[in-house]
């Protein structure tokens, strides 16, 4: 069967869903193809920190009601090292900006609900997706739906299918430049039924490895531990998780961390990755399909949102007036912000983690950098303005 639409979108993560929603608000039709089921997409636990610009965009486009009710506004984070905590205050350093803690899967739920309520088409459980004729004005996507072969014909195509998707792979290798770093550790992420040990996020640099204390609600904590890159969750019984969290958090806050039920565990590899340009012919890559950051700066989801904000505007101009200037500028416009976030995420990762190959010299450099960040208003401002996110038109 053949389906026709203006924009074909591969992937129903935050990038694909928000793009479809923004296009709809501009009167442009799209179809989203997603490998997984709706239930799977809505349960996938990932990021949790929304920059001010992300919150503003979701609010402006009408999908921010629950986020504003249930999201937790945070005006600072704590950096912990040498057995002490040091607060970085966002509003005083950034002219009043803050972040909101609201789980990525909640953003996904809100976007799916908004698309379906508006009659939008999301085809879940689309198998064997492949993109064709992307260098022509009639790109199309072939896939199986309910076992039946289907073809989606469109004018423009958005590859929002994450790092392991098929869209980036469809671009000839010689047309892309890849920049990449793989880190010698991973994050072991835990979702636990326990009140967070602090009202704000704690980034802890410890000699046993980095730890991060985040949350999803006043009753649910989201906790991360630096582990070996090939670590498996089965090696971490609950008792080991709590012991390690208490150690890395230090005595005072550690005592406040209560050992509740562990709801979910998983290991995520750490990588920096950028594919340039983020476009080939009529295929536009957005979000993790084009770039990955290590999670330490909480930038992945925010970059995906910023990309599709730019892409939706460019596509709207193209369909309204035929003007292609914004589409032509899409990749360069996004990459400026992407590289800023890549640098910030690499810097936070490098400052806070224990690297297996590091010696005393490098440990002391890391310590000196942390002391500088908490001791100098200029250094603290640099961290704060990157963390809350630079303006979308930066
Ligand atoms: P995704 O959310 O990956 O969405 C892509 C969608 O495409 C998925 O629904 C996928 O099922 C679908 N898809 C894939 N292949 C196909 C195909 N062939 N056909 C059709 N559909 C396909 N960031 C942070 O800031 N903090 C974190 O703690 C954090 N934790 C993370 C943990 C994990 C395990 C991962 C993978 C990422 C994490 N991130 C984190 C990064 C953040 O979640 C991503 O940057 C964000 O999800 C990017 O959104 P996206 O829409 O571009 O891609
Ligand atoms: C969360 C994830 C991050 O990568 C981060 O830097 C802060 C918080 C979270 O999942 O809550």
Image (cartoon, rainbow, N blue to C red):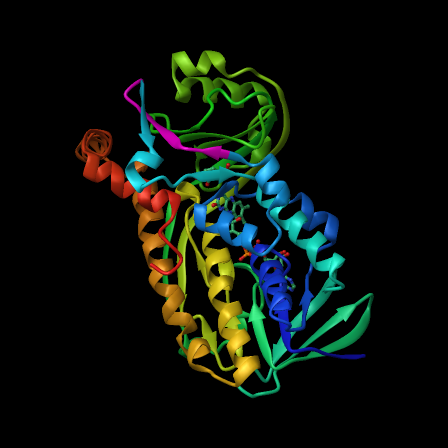
Give the quadrant of the N terminus. Answer: bottom right
- Is residue 125 rendered to the left or right of residue 48? right
Residue 3 spot, x, y in % from top left:
75, 78
Kindly identify the residue that appears in the image at 49 percent across and 62 percent down: 309
Most foreground residue, 265 or 110 = 110
Q: Quadrant of the rendered structure where residue 385 is?
A: top left
Q: Is residue 156 above or below residue 54?
A: below
Q: Range of the magenta residues?
A: 73-83
Give the quadrant of the C terminus. Answer: bottom left
Q: Is residue 147 above or below residue 241?
A: below
Q: Is residue 242 magenta?
A: no
Q: Quadrant of the rendered structure where residue 46 is?
A: top right
Residue 4 spot, x, y in % from top left:
72, 80
Kindly identify the residue that appears in the image at 32 percent across and 31 percent down: 88
Most foreground residue, 339 or 209 = 339
Most foreground residue, 74 or 158 = 74
Kindly identify the residue that appears in the image at 35 percent across and 36 percent down: 91
- Is residue 106 rendered to the left or right of residue 353? right
- Is residue 372 rendered to the left or right of residue 7? left
Residue 170 spot, x, y in % from top left:
54, 75
| Residue 118 can be seen in this image | yes
Kindly identify the residue that appears in the image at 46 percent across and 21 percent down: 198
Determine the main secondary structure of the stretch shown in magenta. Answer: strand
């Amino acid at each position: 069967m053949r389906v026709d639409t203006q924009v074909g979108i591969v992937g129903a993560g935050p990038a694909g869903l928000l793009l479809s929603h923004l296009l709809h608000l501009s009167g442009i039709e799209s179809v989203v193809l997603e490998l997984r089921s709706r239930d799977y997409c809505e349960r996938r636990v990932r990021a949790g920190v929304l920059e001010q610009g992300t919150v503003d965009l979701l609010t402006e486009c009408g999908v921010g009601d629950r986020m504003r009710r249930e999201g937790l506004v945070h005006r600072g984070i704590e950096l912990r090292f040498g057995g002490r905590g040091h607060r970085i205050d966002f509003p005083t350093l950034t002219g009043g900006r803050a972040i909101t803690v609201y789980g990525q899967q909640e953003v996904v739920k809100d976007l799916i609900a908004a698309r379906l309520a508006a009659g939008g088409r999301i085809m879940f459980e689309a198998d064997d997706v492949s993109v064709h004729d992307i260098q022509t004005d009639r790109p199309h996507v072939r896939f199986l739906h309910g076992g039946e072969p289907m073809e989606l014909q469109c004018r423009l195509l958005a590859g929002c299918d994450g790092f392991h998707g098929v869209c980036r792979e469809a671009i000839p290798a010689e047309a892309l430049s890849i920049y990449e770093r793989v880190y010698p550790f991973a994050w072991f992420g835990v979702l636990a039924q326990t009140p967070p040990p602090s009202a704000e996020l704690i980034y802890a640099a410890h000699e046993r490895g980095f730890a991060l204390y985040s949350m999803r609600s006043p009753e649910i904590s989201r906790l991360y531990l630096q582990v070996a890159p090939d670590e498996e969750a089965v090696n971490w019984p609950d008792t080991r998780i709590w012991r390690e969290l208490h150690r890395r958090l230090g005595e005072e806050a550690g005592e406040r961390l209560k050992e509740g039920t562990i709801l979910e565990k998983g290991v995520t590899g750490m990588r920096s990755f950028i594919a340039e340009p983020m476009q080939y012919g009529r295929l536009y890559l957005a979000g993790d399909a084009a770039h990955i950051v290590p999670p330490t700066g909480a930038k992945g989801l925010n970059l995906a949102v910023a990309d599709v904000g730019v892409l939706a505007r460019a596509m709207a101009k193209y369909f309204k007036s035929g003007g292609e200037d914004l589409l032509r500028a899409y990749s360069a416009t996004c990459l400026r912000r992407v590289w800023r976030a890549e640098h910030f995420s690499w810097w936070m990762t490098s400052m806070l983690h224990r690297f297996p190959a590091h010696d005393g010299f490098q440990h002391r450099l890391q310590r000196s950098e942390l002391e500088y960040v908490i001791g100098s208003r200029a250094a603290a401002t640099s961290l704060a303005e990157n963390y809350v996110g630079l303006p979308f038109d930066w």
